[in-house]
Image: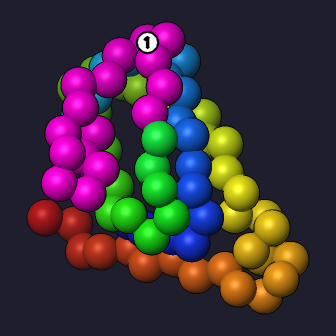
Amino acid sequence: MRSVGSAVWQVFDGDAVATVGDKVFDITKGELFVVPSWCEVTLTARTQIDLFRFSDEPVYEALGLARTHRGENK
């Protein structure tokens, strides 16, 4: 998935692998990671995971400039 607008993701519980562009991160409870605007992000959960996403996407929606692309599952 990728979208207009930057986002900060917070891991509340669980662990996963986050691929942001060409970088791969192991993420676990308590960690944050950032996804720049229009950068592809893929999440692969290792356990059940609880995430929260903070984004400036509502600003783009209000301006009529929002777009999102969801790739096919691999």
Q: Position of residue 73 (x, y in %)?
A: 22, 66
In the rendered image, residue 33, in percent from the top left (x then y), is placed at 44, 33
Instruction: Give, as a single range, the part of the protein colored magenta.
Output: 18-33
Q: Residues within 10 Å of mark 1 (few under 14, many from 20)?
A: some
Is 37 magenta? The answer is: no
Which residue is the extreme one toward the top?
Answer: 30
Which residue has dot 1 on it?
Answer: 29
Residue 69's x, y, as percent?
A: 43, 78
Q: Main secondary structure of the magenta part?
A: strand
- Residue 44, visible in the rendered structure: no
Kindly give the residue lying farthest to the right in the view shown: 62
Q: Residue at x 23, y 25 (%)?
A: 26
- Looking at the rendered image, the quarter that the N terminus falls into is bottom left
In the depicted structure, whether residue 11 falls above or below residue 29: below
Q: Which of 18 and 21 lies nearest the eye of the viewer? A: 21
Q: Is residue 31 above or below residue 74?
A: above
Horizontal side of 14 relative to 4 (left or right) equals: left
Residue ID at (52%, 77%)? 68
Seen at 13% across and 64% down, the residue is 74
Instruction: Name the outermost residue toward the bottom.
Output: 64
